Amino acid sequence: MERKAEPGVPASEAAKLQGLDDITSQKVSEIFKVLGDMTRLKLLALLSAADMRVGDIAESLGMGQSAISHQLRVLRGARLVKFRKEGKEVWYSLDDDHVVKLMCQALDHVSHG
């Protein structure tokens, strides 16, 4: 039985979800697993405002640099953050604007009521 799309959900968006294959479902599941950690969410929120170095992130979150480096490796593996080197410094940033959109959608959902 075909389900009618919720009001406000474009048919093209609903159609994307209908054709999920196993590989794509696994990739999406991995993204949600990575986002399922409070520290990583806070780290991504910081990077949504500005590019930062590991030490600055660690200081902002009150954590050690090795713990932050570990979380950044996980986020890089999920293609949620990227880095660039400027001399001896390594700067981290969000991979693209989809990361902010995804987080804002989740925030809107939990704030919805």
Image (cartoon, rainbow, N blue to C red):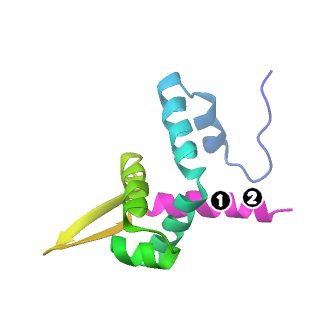
Check the image and report above or below for 10 versus 45. Answer: above
Which of the image's four quarters has the N terminus?
top right
Q: Which residue is at 13% across, 75% downward?
A: 87
Q: Which residue is at 58% across, 53% downward?
A: 37
Indicate yes or no whether the magenta region holds residue 90.
no
Check the image and report above or below for 45 versus 27. Answer: below
Check the image and report above or below for 94 versus 58. Answer: above
**Cβ atoms under marks 1 and 2 closer than 8 Å:** yes
Mark 1 lies on residue: 105
Q: x, y percentage for residue 85?
A: 19, 69
Which of the image's four quarters has the C terminus?
bottom right
Q: Classify mark 2: helix, strand or loop.
A: helix
Mark 2 lies on residue: 109
Indicate yes or no whether the magenta region holds residue 106.
yes
Check the image and report above or below for 44 versus 12. Answer: below
Q: x, y percentage for residue 29?
A: 56, 37
- Secondary structure character of the magenta stretch overall: helix
> What's the distance in space between the residues labelled 1 and 2, CA to CA?
6 Å
Three-letter amino acid code at disc 1? Gln
Which portion, as a residue range, is magenta? Answer: 97-113
